Amino acid sequence: MIVHLLDGTYELFRHFYGRRGRVANDGPFGAVAGVLHMTAQMLEGGATHIGVATDHVIESFRNGLWPGYKTGEGIDRALWRQFHPLEDALSAMGVVVWAMVELEADDALASAARIAAADPRVEKVCIWTPDKDLAQCVVGSRVVQVDRKSGQIRDADAVVAKFGVAPERIPDYLALVGDAADGYPGLPGIGPKTAAQLIARYGPLEAFPPESLRGGVEEALLFKRLATLRADAPLFSDVDALRWRGPTAAFPAAAGKIGDARLLPRVASLQSAISPS
């Protein structure tokens, strides 16, 4: 089986900003409808095991480690109002959702990938997000990262080709170069090429000699902690929990709230396809 793990927060943003010109026609839950249609498309394409991670709140334990870490400040109100309805609608559709509070959606994806990859029945784990943080979860060609926008499937070799470091060194790399999306700057004067060269020479940050970072070792180690995804969330114990078995009885009402008349018949058709004749 192939396990598909979706970054629900990213997808909500993508559909919201991709549909801004049609918001008046889509109603207040246009981005939610977009994510549900995308999920239905995956099921129509043969996906059987799907889990979606969301940021129920934007803040996490990392905000207590670094004052500049990302928050929910500045998020468009029309987008913010769709966060929790997305979780409710996906659950009503019968899709497993991990709504994260202390941890982030990325941590849930890392945890789910670890659990799924430990099951010998799983042939491949696909993490659907372009977020460079998730590159650290890639394992050979078995756990891969999929960028829906570019269509690229990134295995371990592709991670090395893109960043110049192996997947397990991505937290070290991000600690040095920074991550503007997450709100930490990295170390001054160190760009991607230099970071890759330093990691190739010394290995993990913990092995760097102090003089190599001009006294910035402690700050770099803090940024590495921010960049390192938690993979210990007990999300599920059996990948069969991720098998889509059809919508729940709550889905008609959820589809009605979203206001997209195409959703209900599309999902009903999928349900008919998996139901015994």
Image: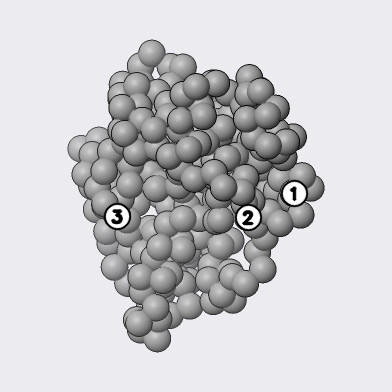
Which amino acid, mark 3? Lys
Give the image location of residue 275, x and y in percent: 27, 39
Give the image location of residue 192, x and y in percent: 45, 42
- CB-based contact (under 8 Å), mark 1 and mark 2: yes
- Few, some or many C-alpha atoms within 10 Å of disc 2 (few <14, some 14-19, many ≥20)? some
C-alpha span from label 3 to label 1: 31 Å
Give the foreground label among 3 and 1.
1
- Report the disc number at residue 183: 2
Give the image location of residue 97, x and y in percent: 52, 45
- Look at 63% across and 55% down and name the residue there: 183
Q: Which residue is mark 1?
A: 66
Q: Quadrant of residue 261?
A: bottom left
C-alpha span from label 3 to label 2: 23 Å
- Report the disc number at residue 149: 3
- Few, some or many C-alpha atoms within 10 Å of disc 3 (few <14, some 14-19, many ≥20)? few
Dot 1: element: loop
| First along the sequence among labels 1 and 2 | 1
- Look at 46% across and 61% down and name the residue there: 12
| First along the sequence among labels 3 and 1 | 1
Give the foreground label among 3 and 2.
2
Dot 2: element: loop
Left or right side of 37 for 92: right
C-alpha span from label 1 to label 2: 9 Å
Vertical placement of 97 versus 228: above or below?
below
- Look at 29% across and 68% down and name the residue there: 262
Image quadrant holding the C terminus, namely: top left
Give the image location of residue 253, x and y in percent: 47, 65
Left or right side of 188 for 168: left
Left or right side of 128 for 61: right
Name the outermost residue toward the bottom.
Answer: 24
Task: Tell me, yes or no, if residue 58 can be seen here.
Answer: no
